[in-house]
Image (cartoon, rainbow, N blue to C red):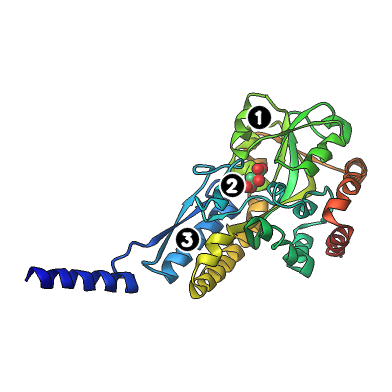
Amino acid sequence: PLKSIAKLATIASILAASFNVFAEPVEIKFSHVVAENTPKGQMALKFKELIEQRLPGEYVVNVFPNSQLFGDNNELAALLLNDVQFVAPSLSKFERYTKKLQIFDLPFLFEDMAAVDRFQQSDSGQKLLNSMNRKGVVGLGYLHNGMKQFSANNPLMLPKDANGKKFRIMASDVIAAQFDAVGAIPVKKPFSEVFTLLQTRAIDGQENTWSNTYSMKFYEVQSHITESNHGVLDYMVVTSNTFWKGLPADKRAVFKSSLDEAIALGNKIAAEKDNEDKQAILDSKRSELVTLSPEDRQQWVNAMKPVWAKFEDQIGKDMIDAAQAANT
Ligand code: LMR
């Protein structure tokens, strides 16, 4: 009888292995740096819901918000080590992997989010999803947040108001050049540190979307927000080549379609939040809105637009032309 029990056990384990019946679901990690109640936070949760619904028992997706698992300084390295399978850094944070995405940081390039969207969906924009393939990073899609506004502890009406002030920036040389252009001092810092830096006055200001300024409470520690719409803060959802190619083709298709759906929801939330979170900030009366006249805004354009020429070689003139064409 012992022999036959052993035989049964062997058969059972072969069956289990081949049909995956007793196997635990595979854990997929999605890490990001923002709050849950943001376009990216909601997109990630939708992705989790769809995968677990469509591939039940096969995969669980665990989402780690607020830089809990990985932050700006290590999430892409962690992705390449397969310690996390999905991240969605802002387009400003890929500089070590490609210079091409710097296009999204050029100040005053896109007129509005509709133009950003047109460019991202164009052939040129779609090509950029593959710009890090050789580094092992696979771009799966763009996700919107919104246009950036300046905030500070003084009203920024004209470029000279930024002179000598310290601004927290994402790790982007283009954004550094943008602040250099108005005599400000850019300081590269991870997102998780921004609130404390502003609160303790270690830095004077920052730039971000309405959604991030609201969800991270930056408006509570900044006296003024200038509605500048001077640049875009969007994301690329990325995975590693190792993980992506390791998925069976049929599962990969489910991952991709689920992600596309989650991104569509995230984009809808981004558009809504842009207005809602701005209104919530204004209603709080914690910081004052600075609105720029067309003439004053033009001064910021004149001061910052020379940055384009500095990065034209790295980004490619054809790309810049394609992006500008999306404005019309
Ligand atoms: C920032 O660092 O300000 C943003 O990239 C955070 C984010 O992911 O929206």
The image quarter containing residue 13 is bottom left
Distance between the alpha carbons at the discs numbered 2 and 1: 28 Å
Identify which residue is drawn at 67% across, 24% down: 201
Identified by mark 1, the residue type is Leu
Identify which residue is drawn at 79% across, 57% down: 112
Identify which residue is drawn at 73% across, 66% down: 126
Please tell me whether mark 1 sits on a helix, a strand or a loop.
helix
Task: Name the mark nearer the viewer: 2 or 3.
Answer: 2
Identified by mark 2, the residue type is Ala
Which residue has dot 1 on it?
198
Residue 315 at what x, y percent from top left?
83, 54
Mark earlier in primary sequence (3, 1): 3
Mark earlier in primary sequence (2, 1): 2
Task: Name the mark nearer the viewer: 2 or 1.
Answer: 2
Mark 3 and 1 residues: CB-CB less than 8 Å, in contact? no
Task: Name the mark nearer the viewer: 3 or 1.
Answer: 3
On screen, residue 249 versus residue 126, left or right, reads: left
Which residue has dot 2 on it?
77
The image quarter containing residue 200 is top right
Mark 2 and 1 residues: CB-CB less than 8 Å, in contact? no
**Label ID, residue 48:** 3
Identified by mark 3, the residue type is Lys
Question: Vertical placement of 116 versus 123: above or below?
Answer: above
